[in-house]
């Protein structure tokens, strides 16, 4: 098994989000996130690695960089209406309306921006990138998204091993 501790490996990003409908987290607020990753699989290749640390760190860092200093919004939320208006994104949830410049926003293909759904997003992105690089020895990927030190959510994605 390979393990990366996001706090110590520099796998982090700072972003704002909204947990639509939540009594306290339903407003724009932010976190300094840390991303922990575990890969479990057969050792393979010339050096008998599950995966080279440099490869998995690069993948996770690229995902973190994409989210860093953005307002993260859930593209698949069933009650949020989105509309592109020139260079701004208008969105509405119940009686609240927002208009934010598009360069400040990232829409993710998830139903909410909770730590739980962000963990699923990261696991899927990592799995896709590893698959594209030809990795077929990994049984599962586990991602923990920490909203600061001491609190986070974890998701384990099982992969098809060939």
Image (cartoon, rainbow, N blue to C red):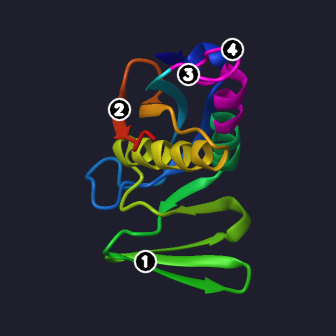
The Cα atoms of the two marked residues, 4 and 2, are separated by 29 Å
Q: Which mark, residue 92?
A: 1
Q: Which percent across, then down, holds residue 28?
A: 48, 53
N-term mark: 4 or 2: 4
Q: Earlier in the sequence, mark 1 or mark 2?
A: 1
CA distance separating discs 1 and 2: 29 Å
Q: Position of residue 6 (x, y in %)?
A: 57, 22
Left or right: 9 with respect to 110?
right
Residue placed at 46% from the left, 49% from the top?
Answer: 121
Residue that badge 4 annotates: 47
Label tally: 4
How many residues crowd mark 3 within 10 Å: few (<14), some (14–19), many (20+)? some
Task: Give the percent coordinates (x, y) of residue 89.
Answer: 61, 76
Looking at the rendered image, the disc whose residue lies closer to the viewer, 1 or 2, is 2
Q: Nearer the viewer, residue 115 or 26?
A: 115
Range drawn in magenta = 43-59
Give neighbour class at mark 1: few <14, some 14-19, many 20+ (Cα, 10 Å): some
Label 4 vs 1, first from the N-terminus? 4
For marks 1 and 3, give the CA distance: 45 Å
Q: Secondary structure at mark 1?
A: strand
How many angstroms separate mark 4 from mark 1 (CA)? 52 Å
Task: Indicate yes or no whether the magenta region holds residue 132.
Answer: no
Residue 53 shown in magenta: yes
From the image, tell me which residue sits under label 3.
50
Above or below, 21 against 58 in this view is below
Q: Dot 2 corresponds to which residue?
A: 154
């Amino acid at each position: 098994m390979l393990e990366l501790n996001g706090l110590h490996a520099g796998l982090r990003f700072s972003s704002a989000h909204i947990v639509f409908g939540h009594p306290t987290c339903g407003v724009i607020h932010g976190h300094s996130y840390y991303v922990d990753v575990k890969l479990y699989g057969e050792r393979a290749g010339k050096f008998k690695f599950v995966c080279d640390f440099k490869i998995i760190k690069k993948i996770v860092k690229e995902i973190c960089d994409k989210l860093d200093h953005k307002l993260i919004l859930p593209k698949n939320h069933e009650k949020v209406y989105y509309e592109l208006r020139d260079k701004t994104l208008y969105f509405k949830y119940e009686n609240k309306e927002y208009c934010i410049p598009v360069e400040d926003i990232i829409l993710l293909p998830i139903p909410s921006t909770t730590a739980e759904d962000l963990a699923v997003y990261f696991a899927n992105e990592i799995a896709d990138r590893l698959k594209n690089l030809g990795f077929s020895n990994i049984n599962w990927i586990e991602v923990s998204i920490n909203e600061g030190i001491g609190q986070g959510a974890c998701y384990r994605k099982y992969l098809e091993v060939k």
